[in-house]
Structures are given as structure tokens and as C-alpha cells.
Amino acid sequence: MDKPLRSLSGLIDFDCAARWGSFKLAAQELHKTPAAVSQQVRQLEETIGMELFIRHPRHVELTEKGHELASTVARMLADLRAKIGALQGGSEERVLRISTTHSFSIKWLVPRMHRFTKLYPELDIRLDSNDKQVNLDDDAVDVAIRYGPITEGDPSVLFRERLIAVYSPELLAPGQTEITLADLPQYPLLYEVSTESWMQLLKQNKALRKARYNFSRGYSHWGVLTQAAVAGQGVALVAYGIACEDIQKGMLRQIRCQDVATSKGYRFLVNPSKAAMPKIHQFRAWMADEIEVMRRSLDEVHATAA
């Protein structure tokens, strides 16, 4: 018969030791002695009947089962801390918890967030930048903004992403005013995951020819790809939503050509228990306004390129 888990204190010590990989460092965070932390973890191991750490002279290492339990415990404690924080704050209405991807957070949301907080200074913003899926049924998240395949008519869709070719002004040679499609063989071409979208852009702009293109640098995230373009590492095919702020600031320039439509975009997902709260409607309306401004700037580029 399995032994019951009678105390949560062992789980807190376990979570801390798992994060630090050390009883000594965990003890410093918890204001305990290393021996006390070690004893709590040992009692937890005895209770659940499995070893959670491999103990080395200067550090500890999670076992395979320890890794699995550490992930669950960390998630559970995060939810618990979020609920306690909300209760201590006195009102769920004053805390807005947003989860979104790393690239969207760094390159789109954060540069604009000051405009939202100026409108609603009473809100306490908690931003979690994470590419993993989140559970919208718990109190750790109010709103999740996620990138992926979208369908027409889905009310959660914020915008459909488009891909554009961009470059840093630093790539321009003396006397050169712009980079065109005809110039591309002279530069490294940067891409996200695969070169397929580059080939699509070249084809629809009738720019495919016998010249050799240097598809030498691939990146796993739009944000990193866009930053590589800002750094002058080559001409990049990037998501407009991620690059638009750098274009507005003059850190990137857009090649005048047709962009590439995609079947992916961003969706605004809401914790069902929070959907009726004013803070959710305020944030959604503000995002819609910001996206409309972004869309108009892209339309202006289209008009110039036409």
C-alpha cells in the first residue's frame, strides 16, 4: 500500500534543490541549513518510495523520476503562488497575467506595453515569456497569445502573419540607396527553419534565376532571426509582426516586393473563468488598436512597392 504524503514542506525543499542542483544553495534561498533541506528531501524520498537525487560530493543531480516530479511540483507551486498573490492583492481585477512566446514578447508586446500601462496604470502586469503550451483553466494565466495555424472566422485570431524581406542599412555599400531582389545573390540569406518561404517569395516576384543564392544561416525563432538581420548578418525573410518595430525605428529596411502570405498567425486565448472581466476586454481592445496601426504601416509599404 502506498504511503500517504502528509506534508508539503518536503515538496518545497525538493523544488528548490531541483532548481539549484544543490542542497547548500537551496538552503540559502529557504533560510535553512543544508542538513535540514537534505533531511526534508530524504523524508520525501522515503515517503514516496523512490530516489529523487543522485548525491555527488559537491552537488546533487535529479534522477529520471526526479525530473518528472520536479516539473509537476514546479507547476503546482507556481499555480499556488499565483493564487496567493491574487488573494493578497485583494482583487483579481488588478492583476493581468499574460503568457506569450519569446519572440512575440520581446519584439512586439514589450516595446508597446508602456502604452497599455499608461491607459490602465491600476493594472499589475505579469508577463510570462514561454513557448510551451499553458493550461488556461488555472489561475496562473489570464490571457495566452500563441502563434500557429489559424482558420478564417475564428474570433480568437489577432492577425495572420506575412513574411517580408528585410536588411540592415549597414549592408548598403557607399552610394547604394537600397537593396533589391536583383542584389540578393550578393548577400547571405537568413531564414527561419527552412528556405521554402524564400523560394516562394522569389517565385511570386518572378525573381527565380540561375544565380546562386547563399542560404547559409537558419534560425529556430523569428525573434532571433530578426535580431540577426538588425545586426547586419544578411538579408532575412522575417515575420512582419516581429520585425515591424525595427522597421519603424529605421533599424531594418524592407525590400520593395510582394510579401508572402502564410497560413499561420496569432490567437488571443482567454482563461474561461476570466473572460467577462473588464481587464480582459481592455487588453483585447488595446491589442486590436495596435494591430490596426501595424496593418496600416504594412499597407503603406505595399502601396510604395506597387
Image (spheres, rainbow, N blue to C red):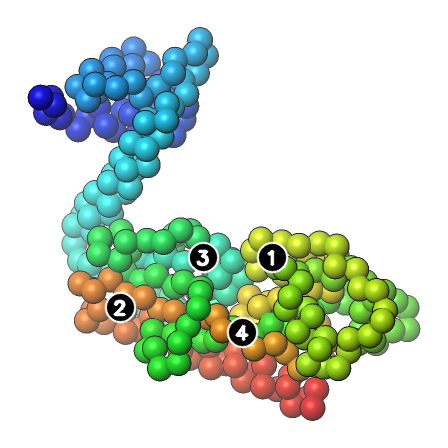
Q: Which residue is denoted by mark 2 in the rendering? A: 279
Q: Can you say whether 187 is above or below 12 in the image?
A: below
The secondary element bearing badge 2 is classed as helix
**Lower position in the chain sequence, tag 1 or tag 2:** 1
Q: Which residue is denoted by mark 4 in the rendering? A: 262
Label 3 neighbour load within 10 Å: few <14, some 14-19, many 20+: many
Q: Which residue is denoted by mark 3 in the rendering? A: 101
Closest to the camera, between mark 1 and mark 2, is: 1
- Percent position of residue 41, x then y: 26, 18
The secondary element bearing badge 3 is classed as loop
Asked whether the residues under the numbered discs 3 and 1 touch, taking CB atoms below 8 Å apart as contact, a structural biologist would say no
- The foreground one among 234 and 217 is 217
Q: Is residue 141 visible?
A: yes
**Lower position in the chain sequence, tag 3 or tag 1:** 3
Q: Can you say whether 266 is above or below 3 in the image?
A: below
The secondary element bearing badge 1 is classed as loop
Q: Residue drawn 58% across and 53% down?
A: 220
Closest to the camera, between mark 3 and mark 1, is: 1
Three-letter code for the amino acid on which mark 2 is drawn: Lys
Closest to the camera, between mark 2 and mark 3, is: 3
Three-letter code for the amino acid on which mark 4 is drawn: Thr
Asked whether the residues under the numbered discs 4 and 1 touch, taking CB atoms below 8 Å apart as contact, a structural biologist would say no
**Lower position in the chain sequence, tag 4 or tag 1:** 1
